[in-house]
Amino acid sequence: QVQLVESGGGLVQAGGSLRLSCAASGRTFSNYVMGWFRRAPGKEREIVAAIIWSGASTYYADSVKGRFTISRDNARTAVYLQMNSLKPEDTAVYYCAARATDQHQYDYWGQGTQVTVSS
């Protein structure tokens, strides 16, 4: 059974940093894309960043480029999202998700972790 468990959310002042972690288990993720999504109050869910498990390629939404960094740790089967220079508009529930590289839809989702950035 695949499980994605996020941690690391919290309350931070604007300009601060947080690192989100996603512990992945239940299968081999070597042929998977791992993504971080977020849903802000009253808004649609949006993708923030993604990484091919091999680490060969990453993607960032324009709104977070230069501020957020996605990475993975093969030994711990974990994916991270380092978030720097946080803004109030980054406030959202952040979700970790996984999909096979040959699929468009993310099949596996974590429960989410709240990030709140105060001004």
Image (tube, rainbow, N blue to C red):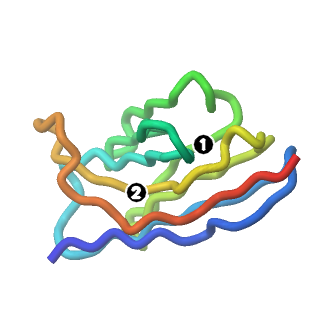
Quadrant in the picture for the N terminus: bottom left
Q: Nearer the viewer, residue 94 or 78?
A: 94
Image side of residue 103 versus residue 18, left or right? left
Q: Secondary structure at mark 1?
A: strand
Q: Left or right: 101 with respect to 115?
A: left
Name the residue at 42% across, 41% down: 45
Q: In terms of depth relative to the viewer, which is nearer, 28 or 42?
A: 42
Position of residue 110 measured from the top left corner of the image (x, y, whole percent): 36, 65
Residue at numbered disc 2: 96
Residue type at mark 2 is: Cys
Q: Residue 118's spot in the image, x, y percent?
A: 83, 52
Choose top left, top right, bottom left or bottom right for residue 72: bottom left
The residue positioned 43% from the left and 37% from the top of the image is: 44
Instruction: Report the residue marked by disc 1.
Output: 69
Q: From the viewer's perspective, tell me whether residue 4 is left or right of residue 71.
A: left
Q: Is residue 83 left or right of residue 80?
A: right
Q: Quadrant of residue 57?
A: top left
Mark nearer the N terminus (1 vs 2): 1
Real-space Cα separation, disc 1 to disc 2, in angstroms:
14 Å
Nearer to us of marks 1 and 2 is: 2
Marks 1 and 2: CB-CB under 8 Å?
no
Please, what is the three-letter code of the amino acid marked with disc 1?
Answer: Thr
35 lies above or below 25: above
The x and y percentages for residue 13 are: 86, 54
Question: Total number of numbered labels?
Answer: 2
Residue 111 is situated, as x and y percent measured from the top left of the image, at 39, 68
Which residue shows up at 53% across the image and 56% down it? Answer: 93
In the depicted structure, whether residue 45 falls above or below residue 17:
above
Q: Residue furthest top?
A: 62
The quarter of the displayed image where residue 26 is located: bottom left
Q: Residue furthest left?
A: 102
